[in-house]
Image (cartoon, coloured by chain):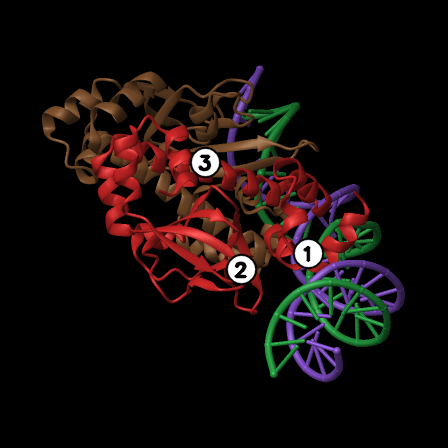
Chain colours: A brown, B red, C purple, D green
Amino acid sequence: MFPTLHNYLSQKSSLSDTEISHVLSHFVVQKAKRKEILIDCNAVSNHFYFIVEGAVRIYSINSEGLELSRFFAFENIFCTALPSFIDQQPTNEYLQAIEHSRLLVINRKDFYKLVDEYHEFERIYRKILEFSFINNQQRIYSYQGYTALERVRLLIKMQPQFLLRVSNKLAASYLGMSPSTLSRTKLKL
Amino acid sequence: MFPTLHNYLSQKSSLSDTEISHVLSHFVVQKAKRKEILIDCNAVSNHFYFIVEGAVRIYSINSEGLELSRFFAFENIFCTALPSFIDQQPTNEYLQAIEHSRLLVINRKDFYKLVDEYHEFERIYRKILEFSFINNQQRIYSYQGYTALERVRLLIKMQPQFLLRVSNKLAASYLGMSPSTLSRTKLKL
DNA sequence: TTAAAACGTTGACCTATATCAATGTTTTTT
DNA sequence: AAAAAACATTGATATAGGTCAACGTTTTAA
C-alpha cells in the first residue's frame, strides 16, 4: 500500500516494515485538480499532505491583493500550512494544487499520535522542521542581500527544475519580484 | 542551580525537578563581552546557547561585504547557528554578543543525548524549531510584500522593545534596508 | 580625559525594480 | 473549433529605497 510513501519512510527512518504499514494505515488518498484549493485562508490547518504526484504551493494575499507564494512542494514532500497546523489559528494562507495531483493525507490528531508513538516518526517530523528552517533561512538572506538576478540564479542552483515547472507568474510571486522583472531577468542569465 | 533556565524548562515542559536538574548538569556558564564573536563563520556550530542575560545576533556577510542579520535573541531564548548545528557544515554565519551577556552552553553531543533521553526535552527542541519556522515564515512574507514602512511597523508590533534595544545600524541589517532608510522611515511612523 | 572611531541623521542624486499598457500567445471553457 | 480568459513579453515611465557625503553626537580606547 502506498509504495511511494513506504519508500520515503523506509529511507528516512529505521522504522520496520510492520511499523511503516501501521503508519500508512492512517493515510488516505486525495486527488486534486489544477488550481484546486485544499486549505482556505480562513480555515484551520488540520491535515498533513504527502505529495505522491503533482505539485502544490502555499501562498497568502497581502493588503493590496497581491499573491505572495511562500513554498512550492513537488513529489515526495510533506507539506501543510504549518503555522496553523502547529498553533491551530486560522491559516491566513492557501494551500493550492498547481498541477493535477495525487496526495496522501493524514489528520492532525493521528499525525501527533504517531509522533508520540514512534520516536522514529517524531524524528522524521523534526527533520521536516529542520529542513524547512534551513530553507527559510536561506531565503531570508537572499531577500536581504541579493538582487533580482542573484535570487534567480540561487533558485536555479538550488532547484534546477523549478522555473521549468512553475509558471512565470507564480515563480515571480515566490521570488518576491513582479512578473515583468522575472521575465526581463531571465534574459540576463 | 541556573534558576532562569530551570524556570524556562519547568514552564515549557512537564519534566520533574530531578529531571531538570539532570538536564541542567550538562550546561556550563559562559560570559561574553559586547561585540564578542561566539561562533565564527568558518567554524562548525557545536553548542546550543541559552541567554540568561544580554543579547546576541546571528549574521552573515554577503559578497559585497554587507552584514545581513538573520536573528536577534534576548533573555530566555535558546539560540545557535542552527543550520550548521544540524548538518555540521561550516556555519557561514557569525553568532555575536551585542551586549555584555551571560549564557548557558551545552555541547551538541549532550544536547542530542538529552533529546533522545527525554521525550519532553525533545518536545522543547521541537517547539524551538516550530517557533523559528513561524517566525521565519512571517519574515519571508514581510520581505515579499511589504514596504520599508510596513516592515518597521510589523517589527514594532511583534517585538516592541527591538528598536529600543538594538542600534539603528543593526536593526537596519535585520530589516533588510540601509541605515539611512531606517532612519528616514522612523520619521514617518 | 582626551583622541579616535563608530554611529545617526539628513541632503542630493542615482538605480533597480515596479507599474502600466500594448501585443501576441497559450490555456481554458463552451 | 471558436471564443474568452489568463499569461508572457516588452516598451515607456515612475518611484522606493540605495549610495555617497557631510556633520554632529555618542561610544570606545588610550
When the figure is inspected, residue A109 is found, relative to residue A79, above or below; the finding is above
Using the rendered image of the protein, determine whether residue A27 is visible from the camera's viewpoint. yes
Residue that appears at 27% across and 35% down: A124
Q: Position of residue B25 (x, y in %)?
A: 27, 45
Left or right of A98 on screen, residue A185? right
Number of the label disc, if any, that sits on residue B131: 3
**Chain that bears disc 2:** A
Local packing at callout 2 (Cα closer than 10 Å; few below 14, some 14-19, many 20+) is some
Q: Are marks 2 and 1 in contact (CB under 8 Å)?
A: no
Indicate the amino acid at tag 2. Glu
Left or right of B99 on screen, residue B184? right
Q: Position of residue B49 (x, y in %)?
A: 40, 50
Cα distance in 3D space between marks 3 and 1: 26 Å
Q: Secondary structure at mark 1?
A: helix
Q: Position of residue A175 (x, y in %)?
A: 55, 47
Q: Quadrant of residue A82?
A: top left
Q: Position of residue C1 (x, y in %)?
A: 75, 78
Residue that appears at 15% across and 23% down: A21
Q: Which residue is mark 1?
A: B168
Position of the N terminus of chain A by quadrant: top left
Q: Secondary structure at mark 2?
A: helix
Cα distance in 3D space between marks 2 and 1: 27 Å
